[in-house]
Image (cartoon, grey):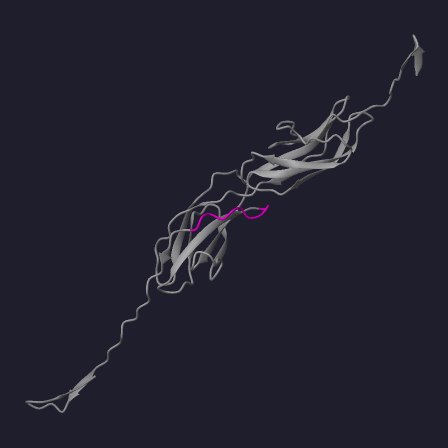
Amino acid sequence: VYVKHASVTLTVAGTTAPTLTTPTATSITATGATLGATVTANGGAALTSRGTVWGTAASPTGNVLAEGGTTVAAFSHARTGLTANTTYTYRGYAINSVGTSYSADGTFTTLPAAPTVGSGSGATDNSFTANWSHPTQGAASYTYEVQVSTNNSTWASPINVMGISSSNASASITGLAAGTTYYYRVLARNATGAGDWSASSAAIATTSSYTAPSITSSAATSVSSATGTMNG
């Protein structure tokens, strides 16, 4: 501290950029997530902004969005506009008069998008083929799941087929009852969890089961020139 012309000037030594830890990602959907971090120190100068950034490579600095707070504390906020089934890297940031600091990187994968349901085909007395179209989304690994209903409202009864390869756009549904109307729907599942179900399909009916009666015969007996007995 020094005095000049009756005014006082304070020189603050040791001011640094803020510090942050603990990036967090919660409430993950196909197109958004709640991202955050914890500001553990302001570096000796008031914060002017804090928020998150994200990208698809390490140490992102783009897609900046301020959270709105300026305290030394944990924070989080909703981020939107993401691509389904895509792995993102994100981190928190905080700014003071010295500069901008970031937390460590965190990663998360958005949920898959819903497939587009097609029409069932190839019905037999105990099976049909469920068909759908692949959703437009990122390259994270995923599988499909198909549920079947007899009333278009109660699902997973009697059939729930899981673990269908993402390269497939159809699945054989077996073990069904003959002469019964069915509906189906499809979702995609990745390491984060299950995406939304597709709309339900149009009705598809298995064929009726029919067994032809068997007929046996025996030789005719008591045969004369005018009469005889036919034996079944």
Q: Which percent across, then down, holds residue 99?
A: 75, 23
Q: Which percent across, then down, holds residue 124?
A: 34, 60
Q: Is residue 216 above or below residue 24?
A: below
**Magenta stretch secondary structure, dominant:** loop
How many numbered marks does the figure carry? 0
Quick check: can you spot residue 216?
Answer: yes
Residue 83 found in image quarter:
top right
Q: Residue at x 81, y 27 (%)?
A: 43
Q: Which percent across, then down, holds residue 6?
A: 93, 10
Q: Is residue 7 above or below residue 223?
A: above
Q: Residue at x 45, y 57 (%)?
A: 148
Q: Which residues are magenta?
A: 191-200
| Image side of residue 106 versus residue 128, left or right | right
In the rendered image, the quadrant that contains the N terminus is top right
Q: Is residue 176 above or below residue 61?
A: below
| Image side of residue 120 versus residue 167, left or right | left
| Image side of residue 90 versus residue 120, left or right | right
* Residue in front for this viewpoint, 161 or 13: 13
Q: Residue at x 39, y 48 (%)?
A: 118
Q: Which percent across, then down, holds residue 82?
A: 56, 35
Return the residue found at the far front.
6
Return the residue found at the far top.
5
Residue 206 painted magenta: no
Quick check: can you spot residue 143?
Answer: no
In the rendered image, the quadrant that contains the C terminus is bottom left
Residue 196 painted magenta: yes
